[in-house]
Amino acid sequence: MSGGRSRAQRHQNTTSFVPKRDMKRTDRERAAERALEALACANVCARCVAKVRWRFQMGKYKARKNAQRGRCAACELKTVRLSYRTVCDGCAKTRGVCAGCAKTAAESAAETGGGDDVAESEGESEGESEGESEGGDA
């Protein structure tokens, strides 16, 4: 049968996923995780922030072990301190790129289509509201 299902899904999620549900953690450990999340979301584009936040939400974030540093794609030195980064913070600031994907803000916005769509939709809504008000006066 290639058609749709006639019955409900057999196993449905009754509760949402909670990472580290079975672990007893102190307030200090939770605060350290929140600080790491804030640090990991700094100096990156919106797309990379969404990726990192998803990893924290689903318990998939893996920090670098034993303070091992990664190699920067720009300067080729071992200066990348955080996971899921390709460029060190210094090179990212000087070159004006995202530390996660090494793309400029314009490139990442064009790739996701986020910035241009918002401007177009605002322009259309203003045009429609002006047209409606003119039509109402006549």
Image (spheres, grey):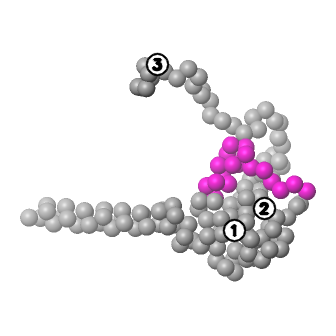
**Residue at image coords 79%, 32%:** 22
Q: Secondary structure at mark 2?
A: loop
**Residue 109 lies in the magenta-colored region:** no
Q: Name the residue furthest front.
A: 1
In this figure, which residue is indicated by the disc labeled 3?
A: 7
Residue on which disc 1 sits: 99
The amino acid type, in three-letter code, at marker 1 is Ala
Quadrant of the snapshot with the N terminus: top left
In the image, residue 76 sits, relative to residue 68, either above or below, namely below
Q: Main secondary structure of the magenta part?
A: helix
Q: How many marks?
A: 3
Dot 1 lies on which element? Answer: loop
Q: Picture coordinates of residue 97 (x, y %)?
A: 64, 73
Q: Image quadrant of residue 137?
A: bottom left
Could you say which quadrant of the image residue 105 lies in? bottom right
Check whether the beta carbons of the residues at disc 3 and disc 1 lie within 8 A of each other: no
Are there few (<14), some (14-19), or many (20+) residues within 10 Å of tag 1?
Answer: many
Which residue matches tag 2? 82
Between the residue at mark 3 and the residue at mark 1, the CA separation in whole angstroms equals: 47 Å
Q: Is residue 42 visible?
A: no
Mark closest to the chain's N terminus, 3 or 1:
3
Estimate the x, y position of residue 56 in percent, counting from the top left.
70, 48
| Magenta-tinted stretch | 49-66
Q: Residue furthest bottom?
A: 94
Position of residue 42 in the picture relative to residue 137 (left or right): right
- Find the distance from the CA under tag 1 to the CA under tag 2: 10 Å
Q: Give percent across and percent down for residue 62.
A: 78, 50
- Residue at 30 percent across and 64 percent down: it is 124
